[in-house]
Amino acid sequence: MQTIPVILDTDPGIDDAVALAAAIFSPQIDLKLITTVAGNVGVAQTTRNALQLLEFWEEDIPVAQGAIRPLCRPPADAAHIHGESGMDGYTFAPPRQSPLIRPAFMAMAECLQESSRPVTLVTIGPLTNVALLLAHYPDCKTNISRIVMMGGSAGRGNFTPNAEFNIAIDPEAAAQVMESGIEIVMCGLDVTNRAVLTPDYMARLKTQSKTGEMLYSLFSHYRSGSLATGLRMHDLCAIAWLVHPDLFQLVDCYVGVETQGTLTAGATVVDLENRFNRPANVRVAMDIDVEGFRHWVEEALARAP
């Protein structure tokens, strides 16, 4: 089986920890590089969190620290959800690995240039690093297979009434990426809000492995209420599409990002009916096989130690 070379751009974050586990231990994925960005918490902490997870799993994957803030806007975060550290609720050993000296967008460019096959960029945080990559190394697009992102929505938001968190944190970066001409698969709230793990499964996960115990501890610390009703696995959907695209139904259409609106900045305008008469630039996930997704998650996390 030929693996998929991947760069994973992330802002760990509790949900990101689950996505990282699935990506690292998926036999279909060859994880070349992890890059971090300011999002759920500040970039120094998201970088430390990525390194702590690699230490926990005894994995040696290069990590490059990325953008400290959005392209044009003041930083914002979701520490009220993920805790001040981003992964409160479990005591991790200090990481022995250090991040690469070069910043994320330069490490991405180097990884792309050195790869013998086109690389998939999987983004589960704000798109600042990717926008910087495309601005500084426009020729690198020829070795990007596609961008698979968790972000956006064809309907309502979860950060503002109209905007999903990852896009709302840096709308200008998202707008640049959407107009890049690269194939984009958008796994937004339309599917991620339905990608729910049941309380029964979470109870089993707790006793399955040290990874299961760790993830359960993270979720119990900040999302204990959701443990009783079901946990939405937003970031994990991007990994799921990459290895099991048959779980999703996609629609090709034009997607724009609002950057000017006082109340709507960060909203993804998904033109399902082609009212703008513009060429499709994004493949938008609009439906998900929930039971199939749950079955895949069980298999994916069972591979983690």
Image (cartoon, helix red, strand yellow):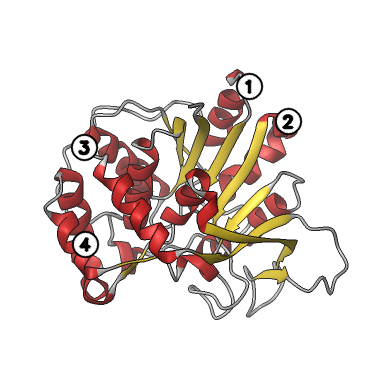
- Secondary structure state at the residue bearing disc 2: helix
- Residue 193 drawn at (x, y percent): 45, 70
Residue 202 is tagged as 4
Q: Is residue 17 above or below residue 144?
A: below
Identify the mark at residue 142; answer none if there is no mark: 2
Amino acid under disc 1: Gln
Specify whether 293 is left or right of 132: left
Determine whether label 3 and label 2 are within 8 Å by CB.
no
Instruction: Please identify, in this view, whether the residue under mark 2 or under mark 4 is nearer the observer.
Output: 4
For the residues labelled 3 and 4, the Cα–Cα distance comes to: 20 Å
Q: CA distance from mark 2 to mark 1?
A: 10 Å
The residue positioned 62% from the left and 68% from the top of the image is: 266
Residue 113 marker: 1
The residue that disc 3 covers is 56
Q: Nearer the viewer, residue 151 or 95?
A: 151
Q: Residues within 10 Å of mark 2 (few under 14, many from 20)?
A: few
Q: Is residue 167 visible?
A: yes
Q: Relative to 288, does residue 158 appear above or below in the rendering?
A: below
